[in-house]
Amino acid sequence: HNDHNACHYIQTGHKWTRTAANGSDVNAQPTDWPSMGSVVEYLSRQQPDSHLRELPDYIYLPNRLGALQGYDRTGQYAGWLGSAYNALATNIRKRDTSDNPYFRPCDDKELDFRVQSLSPTEDLSLDRLDQRRNLLSQFDTVRRQLDQSDAYANYDRIQQRALSLVTSEKMREAFDIQREKDSTRDRYGRHLFGQSTLMGRRMVEAGARFVTVAWDAPDGYSWDSHRSAHHLEQHLLPGFDQAFSALIEDLEQTGLLDETLVVAVGEMGRTPKGTDAWGRGHWSHCFPCVLAGAGVKTGMVYGTSDREAGYPIENAVSPEDLAKTIYWALGIDPDLMLQDRLGRPVPMIESGRPLTNLFG
């Protein structure tokens, strides 16, 4: 699946149906398949006590995928499931067009991890917000008497949820990374991926069920290394290893690793052979994925490739298999049926099988 929208396949478990040639047509559409995180959020909202949650189940850090490239990539949203089940995404930007916050230390002013659409304006204090909420409640009482439709009930739930997120003290504390010790922050790395991974751990501790931390930057500053493979040893591998190992150690020390599945994967691999520009192109025939926690057997390698790591020759795993494994680990039936926008039953994942043999 060597196109520019493999991120849809790996995050939803469904192949991309449109063609994204040369980076075009990569932005999300409301007809896309929902991400796994959005499905988790949707299923959680069906529970009778869902209104008691102060934090959404689906969190996306540090930006929506593609934000630093000027795109709004597919695969991360709820698609036809409905925008109410999109991730709660933070909004951290680079300093200028040439900046790469993944390759340098970030200061606390940058790392505010604000959810832009939920941040009160400077002239709107929480007291004034509460007064406005009370006034709206009086109008809503009258409107409920005039309109008892399902559409209004759904709007009311969304409105109440948005207000609770803005005013939640638990949420503000969870997103305040300065509450962490300096030694802990240093261990994860002060670059954007390290601090975002640490924030991801804080989200899990606060009760979120599906947290995505993306390493998202333009070619030449990221894993999309068409012409800059030397960045692997200088920035990419050291930065990933620092943050990932710190996360595993933290989760293990707090006891959360036993109940948290950690998945490290890209949307595709890179060509086994380098290019003339000393880089590597897109390659989806064979690429790695790391699983840890939630009972996953340690020290295990599943699957075998040929000598050039170009093609699998034993125990090949598909994105559908990975998606079903993640759902299974979350206690969700991998064969569950969802209802599409027309009310028709559709399989959550159309093919594949959960790799239960990876767990012991």
Image (cartoon, grey):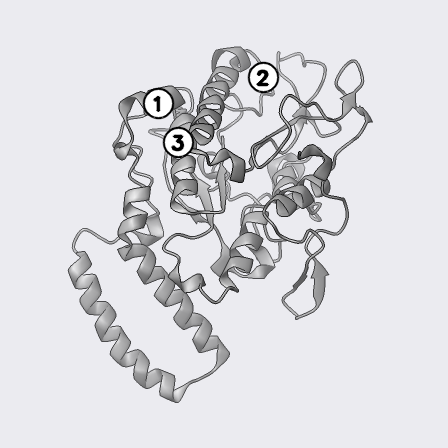
Q: Earlier in the sequence, mark 2 or mark 3?
A: 3
Q: Are marks 3 and 1 in contact (CB under 8 Å)?
A: no
Kindly identify which residue carries mark 3: 198
Residue neighbourhood size for the residue with mark 1, other residues' Cα within 10 Å, grouped as few (<14), some (14–19), many (≥20): many
Asked whether residue 231 is in view, the answer is yes
Residue 338: percent from left, percent from top? 66, 62
The residue type indicated by label 3 comes to Leu
Asked whether residue 355 is in view, the answer is no
Q: Earlier in the sequence, mark 2 or mark 1?
A: 1
Q: Mark 1 falls on what kind of element?
A: loop
Kindly identify which residue carries mark 1: 190
Q: State which quarter of the image contains the C terminus.
A: top right
Q: Residue at 72%, 41% (x, y): give it.
A: 321
Instruction: Give the number of the mark in front: 2 or 3.
Output: 3
Q: State which quarter of the image contains the N terminus.
A: top right
Q: Earlier in the sequence, mark 3 or mark 1?
A: 1
* Front residue of 160 and 91: 160
Q: Residue at 66%, 30% (x, y): give it.
A: 268
195 over 328 or under it: above or below: above
Give the left or right position of residue 138, taking residue 88 as reference: left
Q: Mark 2 falls on what kind of element?
A: loop
Q: Residue furthest right?
A: 313
Numbered label attached to residue 227? 2
Q: Mark 3 falls on what kind of element?
A: helix
The residue type indicated by label 1 comes to Arg
Give the left or right position of residue 211, taking residue 341 as reference: left
Q: CA distance from mark 3 to mark 1?
A: 10 Å
Q: CA distance from mark 2 to mark 1?
A: 26 Å
Residue neighbourhood size for the residue with mark 2, other residues' Cα within 10 Å, grouped as few (<14), some (14–19), many (≥20): some
265 over 278 or under it: above or below: below
Q: Residue at 22%, 53% (x, y): give it.
A: 121
